[in-house]
Image (spheres, rainbow, N blue to C red):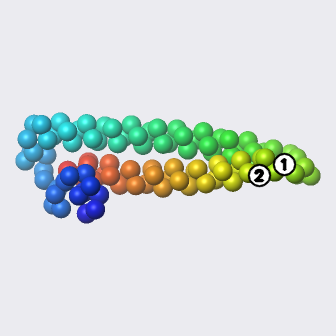
Amino acid sequence: KDIEQDLGLSEKPQAQSNLSKEERKELKLKLREGQRQLQSLERSIAKLNDERKELMEWFEQNFQEFSEEKNKRLAEIEKKIKAKESEWMELEMEVEVLKGS
C-alpha cells in the first residue's frame, strides 16, 4: 500500500481501461523507467560480482599474502552489493505494482 501511495496509485488499482489516455501514458513511462533502472542495477551488481570473484581468486592464489587494501575493497564491494540488491528488490516491487495497475 505504501508503494502504491508513493507512486500516486489508489489502494485498489484501477484497470488500465478505466484510466485516461494521459494516465495510461504516464503509467507506461513510469513502468519503462523502472525497468531501465532495474537493468542498470543488474549491470552494476554484475560488475561488482565480477570484481568480487577476481578478488576471491586472488585470495585463493595468494593465501599466504595479506593485503589490507584488497580486504578493504572486498568488504566495500560486499556492502555495495547488499545495498544495490536491496535497492533492486524495492524497485522490483514498485515495477510489479505498476504492472498490476
Q: Residue furthest right?
A: 64
Q: Tags 1 and 2 in contact by the CB under 8 Å rule?
A: yes
Figure quadrant of residue 4: bottom left
- Point out residue 55 in the picture as x, y percentages from the top left corner: 75, 45
- The quadrant of the image that shows the N terminus is bottom left
Relative horizontal placement of residue 65, taking residue 40 as reference (left or right): right
Which residue is painted at 8% across and 41% down in the image? 20
- The answer to whether residue 39 is above or below residue 73 is above
- Point out residue 39 in the picture as x, y percentages from the top left corner: 44, 39
Say what amino acid the circle numbered 2 marks: Asn
- Point out residue 77 in the picture as x, y percentages from the top left corner: 64, 49
Q: Which residue is denoted by mark 1 in the rendering?
A: 67
Which numbered dot is residue 71? 2
Which residue is painted at 43% across and 54% down in the image? 89
Q: How many marks?
A: 2
Which numbered dot is residue 4? none
Relative horizontal placement of residue 7, taking residue 19 as reference (left or right): right
- Is the residue marked by circle 1 packed among few (<14), some (14-19), or many (20+) residues within 10 Å? few
